[in-house]
């Protein structure tokens, strides 16, 4: 079972009123046009893996903003808030009218931008199996059976992506406020129960699941 609507890599598309772009990761540090503040942040990152992830995220974010909003990469910066969530600045001015969210795996870098809160998460199929190892921390009673979470590694990846995308609306993670805060009721169609209420979309990349969340 491979739940989700196919999403074409490298093409900006609208999902739940948000603009979304997914790109295949390239090895090493990719070339990105960075602003002064972004270069300063990168200079403070000594770990090669983190640098590669960060650059991949900035490249997909800037490509999305350029194609969807017409923002020139040289005039755009994606900088972290105190929470760690990314924020768009254009010509040095924070764009409070836009919300951007990023996610990356070993295989993919994805971004979503919208005029209000948006969450996005991507999970490689090969990583979907990890959800079984922490099932007690992830699922409420009967949840996994009801939504068919363990039918395949693709369904496991889909559940993981839905929960993480939903948690990003809370600016949280798997352990805070906790994956159980998002109860996946169905994968086809994708449906979750959470407080506050949200709408979700489930998309399929060639070897990964991608989920987008918005306020209901």
Image (spheres, rainbow, N blue to C red):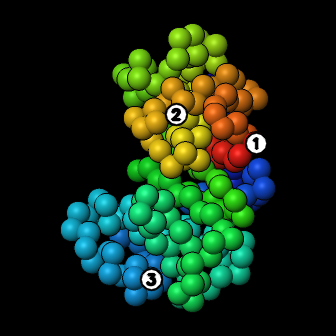
Q: Measure how far apart labels 2 and 3 are at the Cα level.
A: 31 Å
Residue at 46% x, 25% y: name it: 138
Q: Is residue 57 above or below residue 34?
A: above
Q: Residue 167 at what x, y percent from top left?
A: 54, 41
Choose between 46 and 174: the one closer to the eye. 174
Q: Is residue 26 above or below residue 1?
A: below
Choose between 189 and 137: the one closer to the eye. 137
Discs 3, 1 touching: Cβ within 8 Å: no
Residue that mark 2 sits on: 160
Residue 203 in view here: no
Q: Residue 15 at what x, y percent from top left?
A: 75, 52
Choose between 2 and 58: the one closer to the eye. 58
- Dot 3: what SS? loop
Query: Counting other residues with Cα less than 10 Å from the Cα at mark 2, is it few (<14), some (14-19), or many (20 or more)?
Result: many
Residue at 57% x, 89% y: name it: 91
- Dot 1: what SS? loop
Left or right: residue 31 versus residue 4 is left
Q: Earlier in the sequence, mark 3 or mark 1?
A: 3
Query: Counting other residues with Cα less than 10 Å from the Cα at mark 3, is it few (<14), some (14-19), or many (20 or more)?
Result: many
Q: Is residue 145 above or below residue 103?
A: above
Q: Measure how far apart labels 1 and 2 are at the Cα level.
A: 20 Å
Residue that mark 3 sits on: 34
């Amino acid at each position: 079972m491979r739940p989700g609507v196919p999403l074409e890599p490298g093409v900006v598309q609208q999902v739940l009123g948000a603009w979304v772009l997914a790109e295949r990761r390239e090895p090493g540090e990719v070339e990105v046009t960075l602003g002064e503040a972004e270069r300063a942040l990168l200079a403070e990152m000594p770990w090669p893996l983190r640098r590669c992830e960060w650059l991949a995220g900035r490249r997909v974010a800037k490509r999305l903003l350029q194609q969807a909003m017409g923002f020139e990469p040289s005039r755009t910066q994606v900088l972290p808030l105190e929470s760690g969530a990314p924020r768009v600045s254009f010509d040095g001015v924070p764009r409070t009218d836009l919300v951007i969210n990023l996610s990356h795996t070993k295989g993919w870098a994805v971004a979503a931008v919208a005029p209000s809160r948006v969450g996005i998460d991507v999970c490689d199929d090969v990583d979907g199996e990890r959800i079984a190892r922490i099932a007690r921390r992830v699922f409420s009673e009967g949840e996994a059976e009801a939504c068919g979470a363990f039918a395949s590694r693709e369904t496991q990846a889909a559940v993981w992506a839905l929960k993480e995308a939903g948690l990003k609306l809370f600016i949280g993670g798997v352990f805070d406020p906790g994956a159980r805060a998002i109860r996946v009721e169905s994968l086809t169609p994708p449906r979750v129960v959470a407080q506050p209420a949200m709408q979700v979309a489930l998309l399929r990349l060639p070897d990964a699941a991608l989920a987008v969340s918005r306020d209901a």
